């Protein structure tokens, strides 16, 4: 049961992170890279999907879901940096991501222990 909780939570968090990053990148592209305003439509849809996905996390409070999400968001953002923007993360990026994942795990484990 616990393994399923962590697997499902991780999948949802990763999907939410991709949706949030893609949505925010659409606005970035429009405002910072002179892309057309047409980028905003998929961006808004992506941000809506992001918000919906976070409601699917099985925790007892929204703030806890958001706090744990932060760790996976950081890792996914660094993957985006590398894969989409062509900038390879450095050692400090990796160390920070590791700390963020550790924090997210503490929150998720604590959530399950208080049920």
Image (cartoon, grey):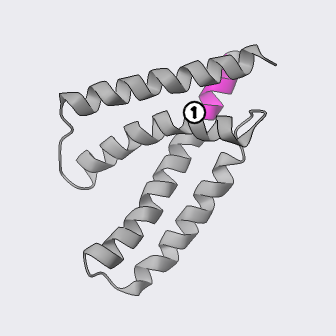
Residue that appears at 46% across and 51% down = 18
Instruction: From the top left corner, tell me how far across and down residue 17 is, in percent.
Output: 49, 48
Q: Is residue 99 left or right of residue 86?
A: right
Task: Tell me the quarter of the picture where residue 115 sits.
Answer: top right
Q: Is residue 5 left or right of residue 28?
A: right
Query: Which quarter of the rendering shows the N terminus?
Result: top right
Say above or below: 1 vs 85. Answer: above
- Taking the view exactly as shown, the residue that stands out farthest to the right is 115
Tell me where the magenta segment starts and ends, as one range.
3-9
Q: State whether the magenta stretch is mostly helix, strand or loop.
A: helix
Say above or below: 111 vs 33. Answer: above
Choose between 92 and 57: the one closer to the eye. 92
- Taking the view exactly as shown, the residue that stands out farthest to the top is 113
Instruction: From the top left corner, tell me how far across and down residue 72 is, in percent.
Output: 47, 36
Residue that appears at 43% across and 28% down = 100
Residue that appears at 72% across and 48% down = 55
Choose between 105 and 79: the one closer to the eye. 105
Q: Secondary structure at mark 1?
A: helix
Residue 11 shows in the view: no
Q: Is residue 25 left or right of residue 40?
A: left
Task: Tell me the quarter of the picture where residue 52 sits.
Answer: bottom right
Instruction: From the top left corner, tell me how far across and down residue 82 is, in percent.
Output: 24, 46
Specify whether residue 4 is painted magenta. yes
Q: Residue under label 1, please give it.
A: 68
Specify whether residue 74 is painted magenta. no
């Amino acid at each position: 049961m616990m393994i399923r909780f962590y697997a499902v939570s991780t999948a949802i968090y990763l999907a939410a992170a991709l949706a949030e990053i893609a949505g925010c990148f659409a606005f970035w592209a429009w405002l910072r890279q002179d892309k057309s305003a047409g980028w905003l439509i998929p961006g808004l849809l992506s941000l809506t999907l992001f918000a919906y996905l976070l409601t699917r996390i099985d925790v007892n409070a929204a703030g806890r879901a958001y706090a744990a999400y932060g760790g996976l968001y950081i890792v996914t953002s660094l993957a985006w940096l590398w894969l989409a923007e062509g900038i390879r993360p450095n050692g400090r990026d990796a160390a920070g991501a590791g700390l963020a994942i550790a924090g997210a795990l503490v929150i998720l484990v604590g959530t399950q222990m208080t049920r």
